[in-house]
Image (cartoon, helix red, strand yellow):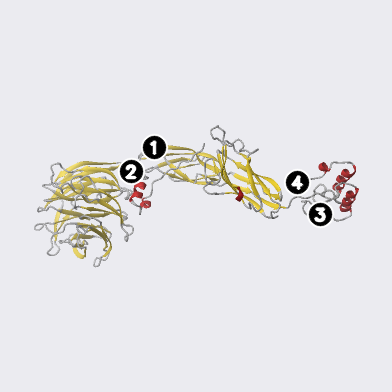
């Protein structure tokens, strides 16, 4: 038996937008498995008495460096050799944030005194050493809690000393910054800037805002979201495609990291949230398909971000020491933006800098596939889709001799048949093969119902013939006859003498014959083992109709198959909704055949000399034949129904009148075909 299997493909994340939490939970269950990852600490460095933020830098030669913002120094680690290559001493400051632009590191803190304001450090001499350039002090204000640099535009954004907003500083001359504008937010902790757009974490306002800073003298706020029941909004970070935003709330304990959909800035919506074991998310960063979060009192959490509405935790690495007693001890910052190197940096408040190796495993090779349509009339164009991910090679066999080596081919079946389809794939996750027996049904099935005529006041049988070119185990016939009951009554359907007479199931599913409709289910095997209907041609059902005497001559009864109620179209080989061709199926209503005077021109009921004389006159003297309008031939003298009265008709009439020939044998039947 042929069966169809539904293959679910990965669900696009866009389909999840706007769903309710219950809908999201159900839809998240339909997503494909996420990749496995390894997240391993491969080096740890201790910097003096304590630490704060960390960042990274890729030199023009491709060499990577991790930068630790310590409480008493700023340290530079060569990630290739796993060595501390230089440090820049600072006065003690509990909070220190830093960013990089070109070959410079910029660091800010809450400190006053030596190396106050924004420190500028030249890194061009690494891996040998760094050069402390100096500090940028903005007037009498020397403190800034956080910093962000728009590396694409060359502008630095600094939190104002009183946390009321941010300054905009040009780095056109990296060693001589110039303040060019600013924004007032009311309260502010941190910002993230990309391409003249600034995402601001508005601290005790329990909100975040988005600003267009293309005009540095007059930035424009694009959106602001106040978080219901929110805490101290610590940082915000957009996804690479800018469709989503991650936000953290540092206090009170227990506030979640949240993900927002911001495709519509007029309707930014919360789509998912997460909190790690330490219950205090500090900083969140999105890199590629993953979201990295530093947590106090726990460590670094790595979440799969392929479907932001359906976050999946892939790893949690605990950086917290058991002897750390303060609530706000643990992992301060995390930096995953290492340009595909697979390295991630994380800084602890206890002064430790962690270097992690982040490895994403490829999906296990899967040869699962789907096709649409799988059933149809030849030529059948079937589009195939490989459902596997991370694949490098495909080898398709379509079962009819056709092959392909691309991921998603289209193949045309030109010969009717039932075809097995196979696929072999290879990729980083290995190799796999899949075979789907009887997967594609390329059909040329035809229902043909003879065009004919039905005479009034008669009972008729109308055969429904099927020409099938593949074996069939089930037929579902939703038949509609037009003109019922005006032109005909639909009396019954039978299978005697038909190709389906041996079928074990012959069931009427919907009987609406008074209006010309009936649905019949025909199944070969109902438990007795009857074989499939072999390819062939001939009647599969017989329709019994009665044509009333008052039917209108010239009107037509038409045969059709189609949807009736909940019943599908004609089903062949368990493939529902396949509609075969229907050839013919029109019957014209005519008068009843009344030819009582056929071969009896004088219509006295006996063949005699007078009938012979009458036919001779028509055949040889040009007399007109007497016509009976109900007869299908020309006239009464047309004994053999040839369409004209001639010498053959004379001979037949003489035989009946003088030699005793049986008129039933000698004469044609004018009411016959």
- Left or right of 49: which side holds 512? right
- Mark 1 or mark 3, which is nearer to you? 3
Disc 2 versus disc 3: distance between alpha carbons?
A: 87 Å
Q: 233 or 381, which is in the foreground?
A: 233
Taking the spot 37% from the left edge, 45% from the top edge, the residue there is 30
- Of marks 4 and 2, which one's residue comes earlier in the chain? 2
Kind of element beneath mark 3: loop
State whether residue 482 is above or below residue 165.
Answer: above
Disc 2 versus disc 1: distance between alpha carbons?
A: 19 Å
- Of marks 4 and 1, which one's residue comes earlier in the chain? 1
Mark 1 Cα-neighbour bin, 10 Å: few <14, some 14–19, many ≥20: some
Residue hosting label 4 = 672
Disc 4 versus disc 2: distance between alpha carbons?
A: 75 Å
- Left or right of 587: which side holds 367? left
Residue 34: mark? 2
Residue 627: mark? 3
- Mark 4 or mark 1, which is nearer to you? 4
Disc 4 versus disc 1: distance between alpha carbons?
A: 70 Å
Disc 1 versus disc 3: distance between alpha carbons?
A: 84 Å
State whether residue 221 is above or below residue 290.
Answer: below
């Amino acid at each position: 038996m042929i069966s169809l299997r539904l293959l679910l493909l990965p669900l696009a994340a866009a389909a999840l937008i706007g769903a309710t939490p219950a809908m999201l939970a159900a839809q998240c269950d339909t997503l494909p498995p996420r990749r496995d990852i390894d997240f391993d600490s491969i080096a740890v460095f201790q910097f003096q008495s304590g630490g704060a933020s960390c960042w990274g830098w890729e030199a023009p030669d491709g060499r990577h460096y991790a930068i630790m913002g310590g409480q008493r120094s700023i340290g530079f680690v060569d990630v290739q050799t796993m060595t501390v290559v230089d440090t820049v001493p600072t006065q003690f400051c509990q909070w220190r944030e830093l960013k990089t632009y070109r070959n410079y590191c910029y660091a800010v803190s809450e400190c006053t005194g030596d190396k106050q304001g924004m420190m500028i450090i030249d890194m061009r001499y690494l891996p040998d050493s760094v050069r402390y350039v100096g500090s940028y002090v903005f007037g009498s204000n020397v403190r800034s809690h956080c910093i962000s640099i728009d590396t694409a535009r060359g502008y630095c954004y600094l939190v104002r000393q009183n946390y009321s907003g941010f300054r905009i500083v040009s780095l056109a001359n990296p060693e001589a910054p110039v303040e060019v504008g600013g924004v007032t937010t009311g309260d502010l902790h941190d910002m993230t800037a990309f391409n003249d757009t600034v995402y601001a974490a508005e601290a005790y306002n329990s909100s975040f805002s988005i600003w267009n800073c293309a005009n540095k003298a007059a930035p424009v706020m694009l959106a602001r979201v106040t978080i219901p029941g929110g805490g101290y909004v610590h940082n915000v970070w957009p996804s690479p495609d800018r469709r989503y935003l991650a936000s953290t709330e540092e206090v009170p304990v227990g506030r979640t990291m949240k993900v927002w959909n911001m495709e519509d800035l007029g309707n930014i919506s919360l789509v998912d949230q997460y909190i790690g074991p330490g219950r205090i998310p500090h900083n969140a960063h999105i890199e590629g398909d993953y979201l990295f979060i530093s947590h106090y009192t726990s460590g670094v959490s790595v979440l799969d971000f392929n479907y932001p509405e359906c976050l999946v935790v892939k790893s949690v690495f605990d950086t917290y020491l058991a002897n750390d007693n303060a609530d706000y001890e643990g992992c301060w910052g995390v930096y995953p933006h290492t340009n595909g190197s697979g390295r991630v940096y994380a800084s602890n408040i206890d002064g430790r800098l962690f270097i992690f190796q982040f490895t994403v495993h490829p999906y296990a090779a899967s040869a699962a596939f789907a096709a649409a349509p799988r059933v149809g009339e030849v030529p059948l164009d079937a589009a195939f889709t490989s459902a596997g991910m991370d694949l490098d090679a495909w080898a398709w066999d379509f079962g009819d001799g056709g092959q392909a080596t691309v991921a998603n081919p289209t193949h045309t079946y030109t010969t009717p048949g039932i075809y097995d389809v196979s696929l072999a794939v290879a990729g980083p996750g290995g190799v796999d093969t899949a075979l789907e027996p009887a997967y594609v049904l390329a059909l040329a099935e035809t229902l043909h119902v003879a065009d004919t005529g039905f005479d009034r006041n008669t009972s008729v049988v109308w055969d429904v013939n099927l020409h099938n070119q593949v074996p069939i185990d089930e037929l579902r016939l939703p038949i509609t006859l037009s003109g019922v009951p005006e032109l005909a009554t639909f009396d019954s359907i039978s299978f005697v003498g038909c190709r389906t007479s041996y079928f074990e199931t012959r069931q009427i599913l919907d009987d609406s014959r008074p209006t010309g409709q009936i649905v019949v289910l025909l199944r070969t095997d109902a438990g007795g083992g009857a074989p499939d209907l072999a390819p062939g041609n001939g009647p599969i059902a017989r329709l019994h109709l009665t044509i009333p005497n008052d039917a209108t001559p010239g009107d037509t009864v038409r045969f059709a198959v189609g949807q009736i109620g909940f019943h599908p179209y004609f089903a062949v080989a368990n493939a529902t909704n396949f509609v075969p061709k229907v050839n013919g199926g029109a019957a014209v209503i005519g008068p009843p055949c009344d030819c009582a005077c056929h071969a009896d021109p004088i219509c006295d009921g006996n063949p005699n000399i007078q009938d012979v004389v009458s036919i001779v006159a028509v055949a040889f003297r040009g007399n007109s034949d007497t016509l009976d309008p109900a007869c299908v031939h020309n006239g009464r003298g047309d004994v053999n129904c040839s369409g004209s009265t001639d010498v053959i008709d004379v001979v037949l009439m003489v035989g009946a009148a003088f030699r005793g020939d049986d008129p039933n044998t000698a004469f044609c039947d004018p009411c016959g075909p």
